Image (cartoon, helix red, strand yellow):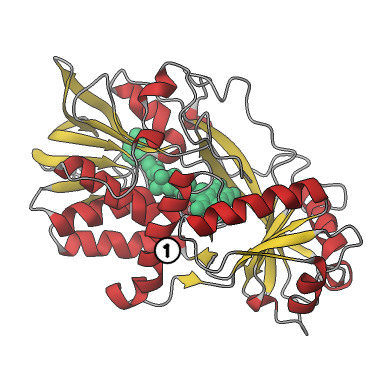
Amino acid sequence: MASTTRTYPQKVDVAIIGAGISGASAAWNLARDSNLKVAVLDAGPRAGGSTSRSAAAFRHQFSSLSNIEMSLLSGREYREFSKAFGCEQVFSQNGYLFLWSEQEAADAAATRVIFQRERGVPDVAMLTASQVREKFPWIDHAEMKGASWCPHDGFLKPDLVASTYLDAAVAKGATLLQYSPVSGIDVSGGVVKGVVVNGQHIAADVVVNAAGPWANTVGKMAGCPVPVTPVKRYLYFTNQIYGHAVAKWPLTVLDLEVYGRPEMNGLMMGWDSKPKKPAGWDQFPAPAIDTTKLNDDIEPGFGIGENDYGFEVLMRMAEWIPMLGEKAGLDHASCGYYEVSPDEKAILSWDPRVKGLLHATGFSGHGVMHAPATGRIVADLVLGRKAPVSLEALALEPLLRNEEREDPERMVI
Ligand SMILES: Cc1cc2nc3c(=O)[nH]c(=O)nc-3n(C[C@H](O)[C@H](O)[C@H](O)COP(=O)(O)OP(=O)(O)OC[C@H]3O[C@@H](n4cnc5c(N)ncnc54)[C@H](O)[C@@H]3O)c2cc1C
């Protein structure tokens, strides 16, 4: 039998661990803006991690300035993406509707809307309950107190985005190494020297940890654990719904809990009330989770049967969208892992413990929408440019001291 041993490059300037949407965007930004030799390594196929399991929603409606800035930056790129790369449309701007059944929550949303408008989010607004009923006649709930609404939000095609970034990076000279699990990071004298893959060493001056839910495991390879915990999340898909233009609906969130958005002419829904975060998820060091055990199993109780969590999610949605009770059934479920940081915000930061190690992780449910900004910031850090967003709020160092970073995100779903 012929030998299948692969030969890897002996030396690159930047080794990116992870060919998900974050690593892909980083590779593209570096390949476009520099002559550096970039390699992207993935244990599996491109976009085979959380990227392909994502609800892929995009919103500007955040409470923290850093997340709003990441969305503004990313939204601009996503709107132009298909033109820039000559691919099909990746961004459905159906809008994002947060519905509120309690006056206090609606009032807090109104305050956030003012903040978001002041920070440059276009057309974000509060709607009264009667305005919601008029604009979205399929929605009704006796307790509805109003909604916050942004027509420029929506949802994305994350696999296509990641794949397009990678192809473009490769066309500019980057190397994509799929099925290449990194098993070690070489460090000497407190400086990164390269990575180990399939027993071979690839020398590198910079190693980017873009390993999503596996980021803590990868950080530990350099003796640098990071507070990123994999947390399982489920998605539920209905059958196609005839007689209603579901494909045009906005992403709709009920009281910051259940959410749903079109998937063709059916609904994709999620809710995180049941799957629990492991104890200590918000601490450093993060809980020691064996990331070789991350899987796509739908655990008992999380399926689509009548006594399952998926059914609960659909019923909750039907309380606000009554026709779902009649017309929608559950078709299937899927799952994946959020890579959660202690304050549920990204870590985009050089590691203060080892020179040359850069983390691009901890997106906590926002990694798809913020990927364009992530790639840009990784390139800015590597190339010594000024980043367009404040990096203090995304720094690793305070988290290693178990301190809260400035500007924590409060709109977490
Ligand atoms: C159910 C669900 C719903 C979500 N909804 C949204 C949403 O609505 N909007 C949004 O923006 N985000 C959402 N997210 C989060 C989003 O999907 C992630 O934040 C994003 O995909 C992270 O991308 P990534 O490239 O950083 O990580 P990943 O896509 O996980 O990529 C990491 C890659 O690293 C590779 N890797 C790991 N270890 C190694 C190693 N040792 N050697 C080589 N390669 C390695 C993996 O194989 C993987 O391909 C959701 C996630 C889930 C699970």
Measuring from the top left, give residue 288's x and y in whole percent.
51, 19
Would you name the residue on which mark 1 appears?
Answer: 75
Q: Is residue 365 left or right of residue 160?
A: right
State whether residue 320 is above or below residue 356: below
Residue 284 higher or lower than 374, as above or below: above
- Tell me if 366 is positioned left or right of 28 in this view: right
311 or 141: nearer the eye? 141
Residue farthest along the right direction in this orientation: 142
Reply above or below: 247 against 404: below
Crowdedness near tag 1: few (<14), some (14–19) or many (≥20) residues, C-alpha within 10 Å:
many
Residue 337 spot, x, y in % from top left = 55, 41
Quarter of the figure with residue 215:
top left
Q: In this view, which residue lies farthest toward the bottom?
A: 243
Q: Is 369 in front, or is 181? A: 369
Amino acid under disc 1: Gly
Q: Residue at x 36, y 49 (%)?
A: 22
Pinpoint residue 283: horizontal percent, then vertical percent: 53, 20
Q: Ligand 1: does it lie within 8 Å of the C-beta at label 1?
A: no
Camera-side residue of 257 and 231? 257
Q: Quadrant of residue 181?
A: top left
Q: Nearer the viewer, residue 346 or 308?
A: 346
- Displayed quadrant of residue 319: bottom right
Q: Could you tell whether 406 is left or right of 195 in the image?
A: right
Q: Is residue 142 visible?
A: yes
Residue at image coords 35%, 22%: 220
